[in-house]
Image: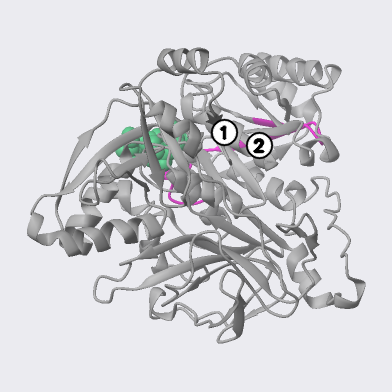
Amino acid sequence: LTDVSKPQVQSSPAHNPEAQNPQVQAEATRRRTFAVISHPDAGKSTLTEALLLHARAITSAGATHGKAGRRGTVSDWMAMEQARGISITSAAIQFEYRNSVINLVDTPGHADFSEDTFRVLSAVDAAVMLVDASKGLEVQTMKLFAVCKQRGIPVITVINKWDRPGSAALDLMDEIRTRTGLVPTPLTWPVGIAGDFRGVIERSTDEFIRFTRTAGGATTADSERISAAVAATEEGDAWVAAAEESELLAEEDQNHDQARFLAGETTPVLFSAAVLNFGVQHILDTLVDFAPAAEAREDAGGGHRAVSSEFSGFVFKVQSGMNSSHRDYVAFVRVCSGQFRRGMIVTHAASGRPFATKYAQHLFGKEREVADEAWPGDIVGLVNASALRVGDTIFEGDAVTFPPLPIFAPEHFRVVRPADTSKHKQFRRGIDQLDHEGVIQVMRSELRGDQAPVLGAVGPMQFEVVEERMTHDFGAAIRMEALPYQLARRTDKESALILGHDRQVEVLMRTDGTLLALFSTPWRLRNTERDHPEILLEDLAAGA
Ligand code: G4P
């Protein structure tokens, strides 16, 4: 696929021309940093693997999974360490494709919608949204579209599993338009209905890309490029139907428009069968051709840090206990500007203190060379970085602080206690650590006391992570008890006094100092709002 149109991806002009560093700018311009997101089971792990396969990062899908043991190992990125030519932190995989450097940032593998996913989205410049052709837009698809919209992340939509029976392609486009408000602008259009996937029309050239199956999907799928005239004779009605639909889309102004895509008004759409490697190369080409490069990033003061300024970055994820033989604390940093060099001394914006960086060498496989440098768009893992918290900025040279990462409204609440009260110390340390890592939100009140904090989660799976980590990492087994609340609203001290008289509402203080009022039902919340119009009950909208 060499002749797809290749518009120049523009970088924002640097605000400080003196700081222009052509090498940094050039490296930033060839970076594409993205995440694959989807409702569980749409094929995220399968696609991740297929993308790497197409990037020639691995030569055979069998390198990371045998058929039987595929599940689990695929999303286990550490297993991919064995593959050469790609560099993995437990947070991101990096590989080269068509002279671009692609950073695929991992989102939690477990079937849940957690805060982790949101934070990862703060570290990427684009998202690939996978939709199951037979299921259409599911609950988490909708939530993720909303987060991308709110954070201004351009979304490339991929309709996956086209090899299985599913909805009509035009119906799926209608669903995207009406339910997300984004105008779908297909770059490819399927030839053959869902379940009879013969190939796609590449809409920029009107040519037919025919897919051919390879045994077990073990190598990249073969594809042939065929002219429209030949496709019409060879594919008959399937071609005619697809060509007509593609024209209909053009008439309705559903063609790709780079400016509207970057403005978050449209979403380019591709069709795939990740399990057969069909349509996967088009996804990589679309990232290179259309996804934004690493660009100037807005700071907390509303200014912009040009990519060619001195080094800066922010922590979007922290993790401990990654290496079972050695309890580490690793902070994952998205590089925003400048060159990161192993061992450099940076300033920690929150404390003003110097921070000596070290690469997470022991996170990498034996055979892999440790990268000594990183550029805007890249992800680096810093070891022994316990001074760093999620959202913190580090920089060299001119001071900068990036905006805090969003904290999301919890929807599930549990009281947590140590199973063995003699383990109070371990309990306290573990809960603090998990709070610190952003695994869970921790809330307390005088009434409940220190031994029984309340945990708040966006998705219930977060509780399982807590249970597992408390037992195995901190040696403090826990007991949890669900609380009947569904909604949290931000409140203040005066309002909390009034709410204190209402036995149906509970007010707790989150570790960040925010007072949260918890309600069991929307109906209960409305009643309180009606009875006490004077009190503060603020929506914790995504990102608040
Ligand atoms: P996830 O990470 O988004 O949760 O999804 P995952 O890749 O694990 O895929 C979920 C299931 O969907 C898997 O089937 C996978 O093989 C299947 N799948 C993914 N992409 C496609 C596709 O393009 N076409 C078809 N027909 N199936 C697809 P499974 O039965 O759960 O596992 P397995 O036994 O196939 O490995």
- Regarding residue 272, the answer to whether it shows in the image is no
Q: Is 83 covered by the magenta stretch?
A: no
Q: Quadrant of residue 392?
A: bottom right
Q: Quadrant of ligand 1?
A: top left
Of the numbered discs 1 and 2, the one sitting upstream in the chain is: 2
Amino acid under disc 1: Ala
Tell me residue 382's x, y (percent).
Answer: 48, 74
- Helix, strand, or loop for circle 2? helix
Frontmost residue, 282 versus 407: 407
Tell me residue 266's x, y (percent).
Answer: 75, 31
Q: Which residues are magenta?
A: 200-220
The CA distance from mark 1 to mark 2 is 10 Å
Residue at coordinates 76% horizontally, 50% vertically from top-left? Answer: 289
- Whether label 1 touches label 2, CB < 8 Å: yes
- As drawn, 538 above or below 471: above
User: Image check: 359 left or right of 414?
Assistant: right
Label 1 belongs to which residue? 541
The circle on residue 150 is 2
Frontmost residue, 81 versus 296: 296
Frontmost residue, 209 versus 398: 398
- As drawn, 11 above or below 215: below
